[in-house]
Image: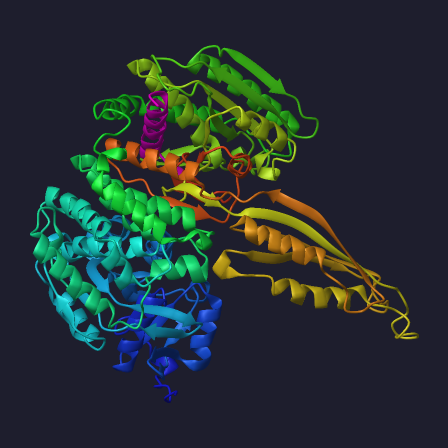
Amino acid sequence: MSDTPHETDPAGFSADSGYTVVGGGAIGGTLAFALAGAGHPVRVIDTDPAHIEAIRARGLTLARGGHRQSVRVHAATPDEFDGPVHRVLLAVKAQATGDALRWIAPRLAEDGYVVSVQNGFNEELIAERIGARRTVAAFVNIFADVIEPGVVLDGGAGALVIGEPDGAPVSERVRSLVADLRSWGPAEASANVEGYLWAKAGFGAMLAATALADASMADLIDRHAPAMDALTAEIFDVADALGITLEAFDAFEPAALRRGADPAARRAATARLTAWLRTQAKDRSGIWRDLAVRHRPVEVTTHYADVLVQAARHGVATPVLRAVLAGLGELEGAPELMSEDRLDALDRLAAHPADRRTDGSPRLDDTAAPAVRSWLAAHQEDMVADLAAYTSQESASDDRAALAACLGWLRGWLDASLGAPAAEETLPREETGDILIRRYPATGGAASPDERPVLLLGHYDTVWSTGTLADWPFRRDGDLITGPGVFDMKAGLVQAVWALRALDALGLPRPACTLMLNGDEETGSLTSRDAIVAEALDSRAALVFEAAADGAVKTARKGVGLFTVTVTGTEAHAGLDPTAGASAVEELAHQILRLGALRDPGAGTSLNVGVIEGGTRSNVTAGRALARLDIRVATDTERRRIGAALAALRPVDPRTSIEVTGDWNRPVFERTAGVAELAELARDCAALLGFELRETSVGGASDGNFVVAAGVPVLDGIGAVGSGAHARSEHTTVGGLVERAALTATVLASLARG
């Protein structure tokens, strides 16, 4: 059943009086529907073009039971709307917060604000980007799902609490927000939103654990009490260490689920929770849906980054939580591996937590990491000077003379910085820059049983043409550093070298390291790929010094395929003999439509027809046409599907023929167990250094793709902090140089100790 959409005047939207909902999915779509239905002007911004188009065509639709109701809202993708925005409800996935804020920040009115109606702890990042006074905290527990473009399934009653960040008193803007949001349901104002967020972290961990198996949330919570009790106890131990007062919501009672709570009270509270879950329209979590239905990475790792960082700082062990997150990582791209056996294993781990390493006993002692950071901070000006000197060496991928000169400079700088290596190899290349390999022995009494070296991988070529420095030289303005190649990826190599220097200066151990630099990464590493794989196979792990993604390390990258589809037809005079020819251009048009159908955004697969060529003259039936494709896939399963589809292309016009050439330029970089373990190690090290390290999946590829595909664990994106790769906005920061060099040093010292 469908009701008539509620109409609003398309020209009547006001940034001052209306709401801009960034992220029109389950939470954002639910709240946008309620606000619009109550007469508030609402604009929905979402990156999914199909979702936006459906909202434009039919309105934003809420499905409840057998009924559907629609309201009219303004809808646009980020590229289509340039602001301004005033009252923003931010409802994107936690891992997309940084990207969303980059869009919001320049458009947000001076007296505007952003409300984090998201899962997880995101307020600190928002405040960092737009200021604390323009940040509003929120706790949301809405059971909903996007079930088709433009349609949100109402999963039942939930909870919504709004407040100022950091426990400030409830303000007038919070009261106004709550009054408007009561159009959805029982919204409340509170000065302790943090207490709700930490309580939900415990509840969310239980739901996350249920996504390890294909069964209802309520049943799995009932059947696996040891694991569920351990999860909430671990998280609430961290909350206790922070002095958080936990708040109950819906049917979740955190006081009864803390460590040491009365067992009878705990069982009764769990029974009330599962009874309530059985009243909801959704019987499986959104995490389960992401894995089993949408086939996309889950956001739960981002949710618990703060929990793990604080656990490390306060010496709280979280073995069961870590096991849940690791298990979910294994299921990304492989939902068929869901099994209740995984929860049985959690039950056993909960009974014997000493069987697993905890973040209460990190791989590096708590005093070494701050010492590394302090030493590097004392040498930050030297690091900046090295980056300035390196940036002055132009190294365009297509200028072999410049590449050779840059590599010669690098040899001298490396000798001056690290001393002579134990061994050095130069692999000459005829058409690109040569490859430099330097081998450094373990130092400082490294005790790891694995004596294979750690591969430190980077490239010295850049996309910037020779001569760019003439009008865009290296510049430093306070903390900001700009110049061609500083972000991608000259700062990364400076950080790697200074990390080794810090360990040597402080007498800390480091493993054997192989530094490998190639000069053709920006053109696809076509002449260095085999050498990289060969070196990787002799290494225990690889650190790739590509730039970070909004500060996050990269634990998954898409595979990249570069293909050309060539159609051969028959030429003829288009006017005198129009039926004699077979048009290659028309046939290519048919094939492009077929190719477009191969896209699967939910699976992370994109296909771009970037170049089309064909025909000779307007009065000649085209005898030849071609299309150049850029294809990106997130899983090897998708790579095989696309490969089979390209091989199966057949002409619509039998008088034409089709040839597909090209190959996969880089394999898929999947988040393997080894990659996840390295990322966990890096997060532990970052916590010891006093900051949170996030991980992310990106569409771009790097040489790390080759290494992971060869079965070697990789930590990618450990390089520069900044943005603007391949653009005149390219920049990094002085603070980032110190932070990432310290992270690299701490990771290497941890690996040295096994």
Q: Is residue 185 above or below residue 442?
A: below
Q: Quadrant of the C terminus?
A: top left
Q: Quadrant of the N terminus?
A: bottom left
State the residue in front, 402 or 514: 514
* Residue 143 falls left or right of residue 557: left
State the residue in front, 146 or 282: 282
Magenta part of the chain: 732-754
What percent of the width, then of the height, locates residue 506?
Answer: 29, 15
What percent of the width, then of the height, locates residue 751?
Answer: 36, 24
Q: Residue at x 41, y 15 (%)?
A: 442
Number of callouts: 0
What percent of the width, then of the height, locates residue 207?
Answer: 28, 57
Q: Is residue 131 above or below residue 315?
A: below
Q: Is residue 274 visible?
A: yes
Q: How is the image coloured?
A: rainbow
Q: Is residue 255 visible?
A: no
**Residue 319, quarter of the rendered image:** top left
Q: Residue at x 43, y 59 (%)?
A: 292
Most distant residue in the right direction = 576
Whether residue 359 appears in magenta in the rendering, the answer is no
State the residue in front, 613 or 237: 237
* Residue 374 falls left or right of residue 516: left
Q: Residue at x 31, y 76 (%)?
A: 33
Whether residue 745 appears in magenta in the rendering, the answer is yes
Question: Magenta: predominant secondary structure element?
Answer: helix
What percent of the width, then of the height, locates residue 430?
Answer: 70, 26
**Residue 76, quarter of the rendered image:** bottom left
